Image (cartoon, rainbow, N blue to C red):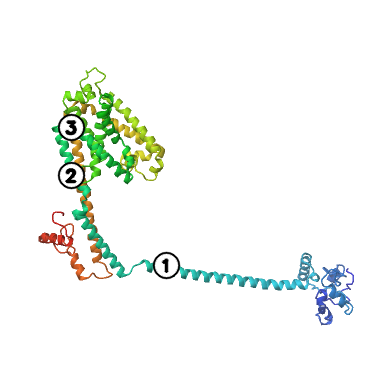
Amino acid sequence: MAVGSPPRSLKRPSLHRRTPSSLGSLASVPEDDLPIMTDRNPAVEAKFRSQPELGVSANSGNPLPGDSTHAGSALLSNNVNTAPLSTPGLSRSNSFSSAYDSDAEDASFFPPVERLTMFDFIENFALTERMEKLQKSVSHQTKRLTETAKTRTASTRDRAIEEWRRRVPSETEQLDKYKKRMRQSVERLNEQWASNTAVTAREKASFIAAVFNIFVSGYLVGGRPEWFPLWYTAQLLYFMPLRYYTYHKKGYHYFLADLCYFVNALLVLSLWVFPQSKRLFISTYCLAMGNNAVAIIMWRNSLVFHSMDKVVSLFIHIMPCATLHCVVHLLSPDYKRQAYPAVWAIQNAAPDSPHRYGLPQMMLWATLPYVVWQLCYHFGITVRRREKIAAGRPTSFTWLRKSYAKNFLGRFVLSLPESLQEPAFMLIQYSYAVLTMIPCPLWFWSRWASGVFLSIVFIWSTYNGANYYIEVYSKRFQKELEQLKKDVAKWQNSPLTPMPQQNAEQMKEFPLLDGGANASGAKAGGEDGEARERKQVSLNVPEASS
């Protein structure tokens, strides 16, 4: 039994525990005013007489020297007499006893009430204030972010609307733009139809030179074949500097290293520098009558008289073949023996002589200069100029890869890895050169076979030129007319501003391309001549130019 705890039978139990000195005023409440528990159980009272009170000791009323309430308790100890400890009133029921045991166990885990200070209560009160302050800060921050987002959204919307208003032209601006577009279309059409602007002086000169070249070449082949090599060399000396200047200006000068230009150089060396070299002549003949002649078909060379570029390209491929045909088949034996002894020696060699070349010997001696050219081209252009080619400078390989991308050979080359595409292209090009050499012995030993072959190649180039004039040149002109018709129809059907009556009357003067109706939808049938007259008057173009 704890010291200072009187027996329960002598004193009424109090229902409160001893409080700190700061709450000592509660201890002065007289016990007579507290309710008295009745129906005491003697067995329960005997049990609790032999057990001390839980959490209460004899010195619990005196705080420790280090306690925060020691000073206040010391001041009050002289004047206030502490009442003796009393055990709390207990119920005689078992449920109350179980609750009392549970409270005793909880007290062992929490500090006694006497250990609590005023600062603990103040700190509990401050926690609520902190929570409220934090909640207000979060609410304020959320509100500020919401207002900022609303402000930015409104600003962005205003800027978007302003930008949209700035970009969308007004009705007057759109009408002015339509007028400007139609004016440009009419001017472009006038440039196409007017001969003094569409056909320049250089194109006129090219047309005249091409027609004159065909006339002179035909005359020399039939009447003076011995002069034809001179005629070919003079033209080559004129066209090559011109080709180098135009191609270098356009960035196409890597094409000048192709095999066709190399064959022309070999032919000049064989005719004027080494006329006695039989091997040089036979290799030049195979490459010219094989690779250069078939390249007219492969590269689509066209006989377009007004285009100097196309005329020069056709000259480079077909003129070496015509020159060799004259030297081999049209010259007299005496003149051939004196001017071109290598040709005379090959044609007059015995059947068992090593100088009477057949197909294997021709392919062998033609392969040697081809290999020299291929190595020089690969290391001089493909390797040394790789950066410029990658930057967009065109070569024969890049052109063929783009032109024949849908062909089975093009698809095969493009399907290979990047490092193998160029070797594959070189192998295909050499195979093509060898295949074109196969009929060369027939061209060399038969005059009529050579003539028929050259005629077929020349007709093919003329056919390509006809396609250019009809399908390319005329379609380009027709496209200009279609664009003008679309611009006029778009202006007339514009819902923004009705077209003035004066301009509407002027638009009626433009006939449709099919000749079925004019721009206003009227029938043209019997008024076709009047429509042409209106077109000439409105565009100031003579009848012949249309």
Of badges 1 and 2, nearer the viewer stands 2
Residue at the image position 22 percent from the left and 57 percent from the top? 189
Which quadrant of the rendered structure holds the C terminus? bottom left
Q: Quadrant of residue 96?
A: bottom right
Toward the viewer: 92 or 434? 434
Residue identifier under label 1: 160
Q: Quadrant of residue 4?
A: bottom right
Residue 481 in sight here: no
Q: Which mark is residue 414?
A: none
Relative side of 439 to 115, left or right: left
Residue identifier under label 3: 227
Q: Are marks 3 and 1 in contact (CB under 8 Å)?
A: no
Residue at the image position 21 percent from the left and 47 percent from the top? 203
Relative side of 313 to 401, left or right: left
Q: Amino acid at mark 1?
A: Ala
Q: Position of residue 61 (x, y in %)?
A: 85, 72
Q: Position of residue 3 (x, y in %)?
A: 90, 70
Q: Amino acid at mark 2?
A: Ile
